[in-house]
Image (cartoon, grey):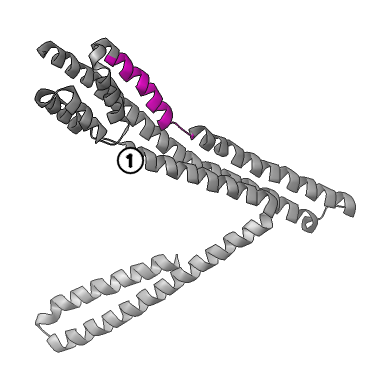
Amino acid sequence: MKKLFAFVAVFVMLFTGASINAFAQDEPQDTTQAIEQVAQEAAATVEETVAEASDEGLELHKQIKIKFVEGGAQFMGAVLLTLILGLAIAIERIIYLNLATTNTDKLLKKIEDALESGGIEEAKEVCRNTRGPVASIFFQGLDRFDEGVEMAEKSIVAYGGVQMGLLEKNLSWISLFIAIAPMLGFMGTVIGMIDAFDKIEEAGNVSAGLVAGGIKIALITTVSGLIVAVVLQIFYNYILSKVDALTNQMEDASITLVDLLVKYNLKK
């Protein structure tokens, strides 16, 4: 809220300065002094806002460290490990899928031109020089063209399944970490509640001070596990959408390639 008020104040002062500038035609000297004063006040406000934001960022960082320690190194460390491993795999998959994306329309046009000018060998060379699973599937189909169009189509379908497996590689690990993170949090919850009841049993009476520590551990670990699961689930769904898009792209492009091969075979 402090930052919001500060930004509003800066906006109001800048707007006021603009209004004074518009009025400068009648009183230039007074207007210049007013603008300088507004600029100084705005600069001071911006500096104060930046300083407050930095202090709040440091305070948030310290609060996270404190909550991590309060949650217990055993379970909080396990939850953090699932987050690190899950994000590492997710980022690797995103990079791989982005590199695997190909402009299929442009590739098909190059292959069509290569078939008309140089034949199968030149079309295969185009596929060799193109990155991505679509080009690899095309190469397999062109490589089997000498055995007939049907064999080339079967080769495209078979190698398409191989490329699908490569696109979906390690996704099961991300789904595993999504499932494990809340479980670790709930396990910390159960252990924290057990610790709270042990303290009640030792004291022989119920006191808020006795059980607060155990309940705090329970809540912190649970929230941490749920946050990790939500973050990884977002990455997982994004990766699935990329895989589906690439799969549809490969299927559509493969059908078009088979049509080109049939047309080329009829011209021979």
At 25% across and 24% down in the image, what residue appears? 253
Q: Position of residue 61 (x, y in %)?
A: 54, 63
In this orientation, which residue lies closer to the viewer: 146 or 219?
146
Please indicate whether residue 206 sits to the left or right of residue 15 in the image: right
On-image quarter of the C terminus: top left
In terms of image quadrants, where is residue 240? top left
Quadrant housing residue 182: top right
Residue type indicated by callout 1:
Leu
Specify the quadrant of the image occupied by residue 151: top left
Q: Is residue 136 above or below residue 180?
A: above
Tell me: residue 60, above or below residue 192: below
Would you name the residue on which mark 1 appears? 99
Relative to residue 176, is residue 137 drawn left or right?
A: left
Q: Which residues are magenta?
A: 152-170
Q: Nearer the viewer, residue 105 or 205?
A: 105
Callout 1: SS: helix
Whether residue 231 is visible: no
The secondary structure that dominates the magenta segment is helix
Q: Nearer the viewer, residue 91 or 268?
A: 268
Identify the residue shown where x is 84% and y is 52%.
199
Whether residue 69 is visible here, answered yes or no, is yes
The picture places residue 134, in percent across and down from the top left corner, at 29, 29
- Whether residue 86 is in magenta: the answer is no
**Quarter in which the N terminus is drawn:** bottom left
- The number of numbered badges drawn on the structure is 1
Front in this rendered view, residue 30 or 263: 263
